[in-house]
């Protein structure tokens, strides 16, 4: 498969097929007061045009955001919420070379002046999966230190 196909398979098809496989369990577990949860992982590169030409990555993440909204509409009546977290720059294997070369510039471009930490993502996932997030569905939440909304 081409590099494009590999990225689309991982970022878009995998969450779709995983949702489809888990749907019987999710609908059995969800109630009106305590819906089952699906939390997809998008990216701020799916919300804006990224600085680097990552065609397959940014396109596949934008598609994950739309898949999230479509599934939220479809699965809400079945007591399943569907949301996405759209991370900005975080330390990871995928970002290692970029952060090594441009990490200081990327951190400086964030209104909060830093790269994301694991607990930044974890807090958002905990919220979406908790009682506090039970009335949130179809949302794509940027966790990026304000980069996406201020540039």
Image: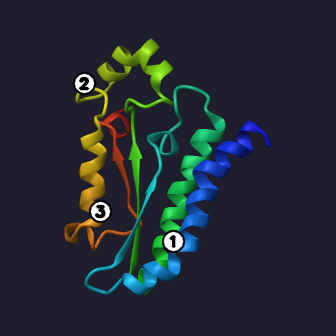
Circle on res. 71: 1
Q: For mark 3, what is the residue?
A: 128
Task: From the image, state whether disc 3 or disc 1 is nearer to you.
Answer: 3
**Residue 75 location (% of width, % of height):** 47, 79
**Residue 49 location (% of width, % of height):** 53, 36
The answer to whether the residues at label 3 and label 2 have Cβ atoms under 8 Å apart is no
Q: For mark 2, what is the residue?
A: 113
Residue depicted at 54% across the width and 48% down the height: 61
| Residue 20 image-quadrant placement | bottom right
Q: Residues within 10 Å of mark 3 (few under 14, many from 20)?
A: many
The answer to whether the residues at label 3 and label 1 have Cβ atoms under 8 Å apart is no
Q: Secondary structure at mark 2?
A: loop
Front-lying residue, 13 or 138: 13
Circle on res. 34: none
Quick one: which residue is furthest to the right in this view? Answer: 1
Look at the image and tell me in which quarter the N terminus lies: top right
């Amino acid at each position: 498969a081409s590099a494009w196909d590999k990225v689309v398979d991982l970022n878009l098809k995998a969450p779709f097929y995983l949702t489809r496989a888990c749907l019987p369990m999710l609908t059995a577990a969800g109630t009106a007061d305590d819906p089952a949860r699906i939390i997809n992982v998008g990216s701020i590169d799916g919300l804006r045009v990224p600085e680097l030409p990552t065609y397959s990555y940014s396109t596949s993440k934008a598609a994950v955001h739309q898949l999230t909204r479509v599934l939220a509409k479809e699965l809400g009546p079945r007591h399943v919420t569907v949301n996405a977290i759209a991370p900005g720059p975080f330390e990871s294997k995928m970002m290692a070379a970029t952060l090594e070369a441009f990490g200081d510039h990327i951190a400086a471009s964030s209104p909060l002046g830093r790269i994301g930490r694991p607990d930044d993502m974890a807090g958002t996932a905990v919220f979406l999966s908790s009682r506090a997030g039970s009335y949130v569905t179809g949302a794509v939440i940027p966790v990026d230190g304000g980069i996406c909304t201020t540039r």
